[in-house]
Image (cartoon, rainbow, N blue to C red):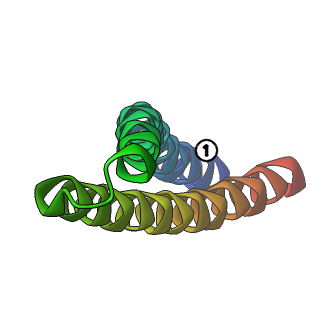
Amino acid sequence: MTEKTMKIQKIFQHRLAVTSKISQLNAQHLQQSQQLMGVRLDVQRCADNVHENTADTALRAEYAQSRALEAQLVSAMEQCDAERMKFEREVEKLDRKLAAL
């Protein structure tokens, strides 16, 4: 096996590992997105009911918890997106290396 072939093989192996990580992050993002939609339905339900029954402290607590979970999920999704973009840039870099060989 030539040195060039070994370099190509090494780059492809690394690219495969990186694209696998991107796939995992995409799945994670989808799961977070689905969970976020459910939480947002809870937030809306609580918000509607809080306005109708302002004295219900349990409902207010559930509303606050739902809002906090919503914020956590949004933050987690933003972090996931940032990490995915980092790996996508790495794939682009690897593709340029392959094209140069």
Q: Residue furthest left?
A: 58
Would residue 30 be visible to someone looking at this image?
yes
Instruction: Look at the picture and state if 96 lies above or below 23.
Output: below
Q: Position of residue 74 (x, y in %)?
A: 49, 60
Asked if residue 97 lies left or right of residue 21, the reply is: right
Q: Quadrant of residue 35?
A: top left
| Residue type indicated by callout 1 | Thr
Q: Which residue is drawn at 40% across and 57% down?
A: 70
Q: Residue at x 49, y 57 (%)?
A: 77
Asked if residue 76 lies left or right of residue 9, the reply is: left
Asked if residue 12 lies left or right of residue 91, the reply is: left
Q: Position of residue 14 (x, y in %)?
A: 48, 53
| Mark 1: few/some/many CA within 10 Å (<14, 14-19, 20+) | few
Task: Tell me the element at label 1.
Answer: helix
Q: In which quarter of the image is residue 7?
A: bottom right
Question: Number of marks in the image?
Answer: 1
Using the image as rendered, state which of residue 43 and residue 88 is in the foreground.
43
Using the image as rendered, state which of residue 75 and residue 22 is in the foreground.
75
Q: Residue at x 40, y 47 (%)?
A: 43
Using the image as rendered, state which of residue 98 and residue 75 is in the foreground.
75
Instruction: Look at the picture and state if 30 lies above or below 88.
Output: above
Q: Position of residue 81 (x, y in %)?
A: 58, 58
Q: Which residue is drawn at 23% across and 61% down?
A: 55
According to the picture, the residue beneath numbered tag 1 turns out to be 5
Q: Where is residue 50 in the image (x, y as percent from the top left)?
A: 36, 52
Would residue 16 be visible to someone looking at this image?
no
